[in-house]
Every structure is written in structure tokens, then in C-alpha cells.
Amino acid sequence: MRFTKAIVPITLCLLLACFAVPAQKKKGRTAEQHSKPIVVSAIDNDALKALLTQQRERPLLVNFWATYCDPCRDEFPDLVKIDKEYRPQSLEFVTVSLDDMTDIKTGVPKFLSDMKATMPAYLLNTTDPEPAINMVDQRWRGDLPATFLYNEKGEVVYKHIGRINPAELREAIDKVVKKGS
Amino acid sequence: MKRNLSILLASLLVIAGAVLAIGARAEGEVPAPPAIGATIDDFTLPDVDNKDHSLKSLAGKNGTVLLFIAVQCPVSNAYNERMEKLAADYKAKGIAVIGINSNVAEDAAAVKAHAAEHKLTFPILKDSGNKIADKLGASVTPEAYFIDMNNKLLYHGRIDNSRNSAQVETSDLRNALDAALANKAVEKTEAKAFGCSIKRS
């Protein structure tokens, strides 16, 4: 009787283990299949201007950041969540790093990979960031992070200098995205 | 009794929410810097050995450069040699360079060790509570302010155009100092500073 009582949970455990092991293996394989290396593209002042000001089909969210900027690193998990949440709702989201060009294949993609960030990533390739900063916003002093939301006409409809407030940013995005499109 | 307790709890929640909201709004906001031509008031800050110095006591006879710098910021650190050279080059010309560290997480001992390690010989003051950073609207490191012998602000912004010393094309701060020494008007009075945000308390 005691043996019968003991065998039931043991059998159950064994059965569960049989199902759990292949499930775990499958999960691991899937993660490997989906993990593409992150490519960070260099973008110069003119290309950045074209990217930001052109007319487009979808609103565009742009986050300027750098690996050396603590508040940028701190807010990144929220940005990744927002990207995943709103990309299906027709929001384009790109990040522009102001790191040094020497970081384009090292520190920048490593951080983005750690963050599981999948939005297109750029690094500002310039010897002088001031024209780009002024082009984005005359009143922006270049401090990071800085987040700008553009509508389809290429007009800034929301901006935030410093660490984002996710609720406030979501509210701004909600006003411009076409839900369900 | 229960109702009173509920009211008290609700009030406390509202107060806590308001405090959090104010804190969240204050984060990342930097006071506006003084306009070019404004006079910077004298101030006193301790050095890394906790000895007080007034701006007046450290000022150069032909002007003073205030440089907001950091211990851990890679951008500020990329400028260590350039800042030291700037201080050495202009000392003989009567312009003093003063470093200011306003980062809350970098104490005087860390600032002292960093200066020794990187051979920074110009005076560095510790701005606890970021009072001077707030007064001057400094937002990043490195960020420079050049004032004349009457504390009039002549230039505010970056040291030069690039973190990478091999790519320097425009030495905005040096240009401002040279213009002032030659009794000429500074052509470019502002150039946007880039670097790590100052960690305020």
C-alpha cells in the first residue's frame, strides 16, 4: 500500500520530466534561430536629416542615446517594450547612438543585443555633432537621452529630453498611431 | 473609526503620489544657463582636500575657464590630456582653469584619485548638491564656461568638436580664449556641449 502511494507521485514526476526536457530543448533552439546579430549602421548628418524629415506612411519615434549615458541605459528596457508593443500598430522606431565610430561594432551592438533591442540602430557618423543636434531641434542642448516623435509629415509632435516617462510617451504615441492598422 | 482610517490612508496615498509625480518631473530637468554677457556671481566650493576656495581667489587676471568634469564619464576622460594642456597653455597668459565635479556619486576622494591618476594639475572643486551646476545650468561633462576678469560670461559649451582628439577641427573654447586675449569679440559664443549628463542629487 505504502509502495503504491509512493509510486504515483514518482511516475507523475518522471512523466513531467519527459515532457519538460524536450520543451526546454525546443525553447533553446527557437531562441537560437531568432537571435540575429545586431547590425548598427553609420548615418551622417544629411542622411539623418532625410530620415527624420521625409514624409512617411507611419509615425516615427527616434531615441538619441549613448552607451556612456546612464539614464539612456536605464530607460532602454522601457523603449524595447514600447517598440514591441507599438510596432504592430504601425509605429516606426529607430535609435541613433552618439557613441564614437570605434564603438559601432563593439560596445553599441553588444548593449543592444543585451537589451534584446530589435529596432533599426544607427550611429551618428560625424566629426562634429552640433549641426545634427541643431537640425533635430535648435533648443536641444545635445544632452542625452533625447526622444522625438514625428508624425507622417515629418513634424515633431512630441519630444522629451532626459529619461522618458513611459506612460507619457505611450500617451503621445497613442495620439498618432492608427490602431489595428 | 474604519471610515476615518480609510480617509487617512487615501490622503496618504494622494500625498505619496503627488511627491512621486513631482520627483519624476524634476528628473532630467536642468536649469537654463545664464545668457552670454551675464555676470557670474562669486561662489565658494571646497577642493578635493576640503579646503574652501572662492572663484575670486582662483580667477586668472585675464579670465577664468570653469570646466565641469567627471571621474567615470568616458567623454570627459577623453578630454583629460586636452584639459590639462589647456590649463598649462593659458596659465602663462593669465587665464585660469578650474575643474568642477558636480556628480553626486563621485566624492572628493574619488576626484582626488582620478586627478592624480590622469595628472590633472589644475584645481578641481567639489560641487556637492550640484549648486553651481544648477546656477550655471551645466548639463553634461565636459562642459565649459569662460568668464572674463569681471566675471562676464563670454563663452559656454563644448571644448572642441570631437571626443576623438585626432578628429578635432574646431577648438571652440581655445578660439574664445584667444579672441578675448586679443581684445576681440568672441565669434562663436556658444557651441553645444556633448558628454555624460551630470548626475544630480
Image: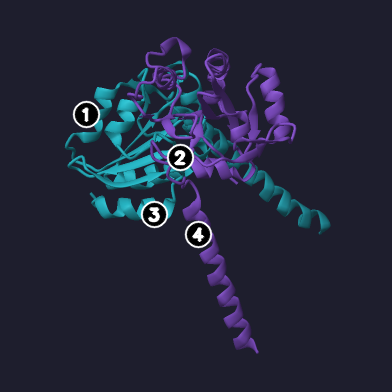
Query: Tag 3 or tag 1, which sits nearer the N-term?
Result: 1
**Residues under numbered marks 1 and 4 in contact, where contact means CB atoms less than 8 Å apart:** no
For the point 30% across and 32% down, the residue is A134
**Horizontally, is B198 left or right of A130 in the view?**
right
* Labels 1 and 3 positioned on one and the same chain: yes
Residue indicated by mark 4 = B22
Q: Secondary structure at mark 1?
A: helix
- Chain A, hue in figure: cyan
Q: Nearer the viewer, residue B195 or A101?
A: B195
Type of the residue with mark 4: Ile
> What is the spatial separation of the Cα atoms under label 4 and label 3, in whole angstroms?
14 Å
* Labels 4 and 3 positioned on one and the same chain: no
Q: Nearer the viewer, mark 1 or mark 4?
A: 4
Residue indicated by mark 2 = B39
Q: Which chain is purple?
A: B
> What is the spatial separation of the Cα atoms under label 1 and label 3, in whole angstroms?
27 Å
> What is the spatial separation of the Cα atoms under label 4 and label 2, in whole angstroms?
31 Å
Query: Tag 2 or tag 4, which sits nearer the N-term?
Result: 4
> What is the spatial separation of the Cα atoms under label 3 and label 2, in whole angstroms?
38 Å
Location of residue B155 (image quadrant): top left
